Amino acid sequence: PPAVIPHAQESRGLGDVYKRQRQIWRGEAKAFSGDQQALAVALMGLQQGWVAAEPQRPRRQFWLMPLLHSEEEGVVAKAIPLLEQWADAATADVARRNLMQLQRFSRYPQRNAALGRNSSRAEVLFLEG
């Protein structure tokens, strides 16, 4: 449908902003400041059928990145079959590894320093391993 095209273009722009924000502010809390907004747009894209309508796999993958990077177990669990369907097995495997971290620690330990969180002994051992 014609309405998909503008949204797909906007999503690529948002995806670029999301990616740049992560790179520019790497190691700082600001790197994660747009995560909730990006997740909301990604979920809207799924609900509206924009992800399904996107013909290019890399663009579908960008739509789903905010789900993959979420620190909410349920969101990452939801991402796995979506990534298998619309992206690729390797990216779905990344989501599985992320989910295992969330199940173990309830967060991503590698974000602790940037977000000013104290790491538990188990998290320190995980990060060192």
Image: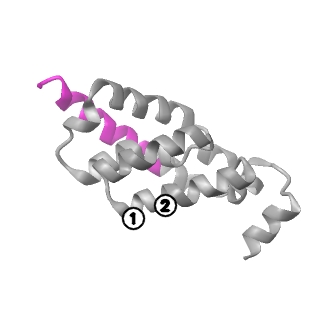
Q: Quadrant of residue 126?
A: bottom right
Q: In terms of secondary structure, what is the magenta stretch mainly?
A: helix
Task: Please tell me which residue lies in front, 14 or 78.
Answer: 78
Image position, residue 89 (x, y; %)? 36, 61
Task: Please tell me which residue lies in front, 100 or 41.
Answer: 100
Quarter containing the C terminus: bottom right
Residue identified by numbered label 1: 90
Q: Residue at x 25, y 35 (%)?
A: 8
Q: Residue at x 17, y 31 (%)?
A: 5
30 on left or right of 18 = right
Q: Quadrant of residue 24?
A: bottom right
68 on left or right of 81 = right
Task: Please tell me which residue lies in front, 18 or 72.
Answer: 72
Q: Amino acid at mark 1?
A: Ala
Q: Are marks 1 and 2 in contact (CB under 8 Å)?
A: yes
- The answer to whether residue 34 of the structure is visible from this angle is no
Q: Amino acid at mark 2?
A: Val
Residue identified by numbered label 2: 94
Q: Residue at x 11, y 25 (%)?
A: 2
Task: Please tell me which residue lies in front, 66 or 6.
Answer: 66
Quarter containing the N terminus: top left
Image position, residue 102 (x, y; %)? 66, 50
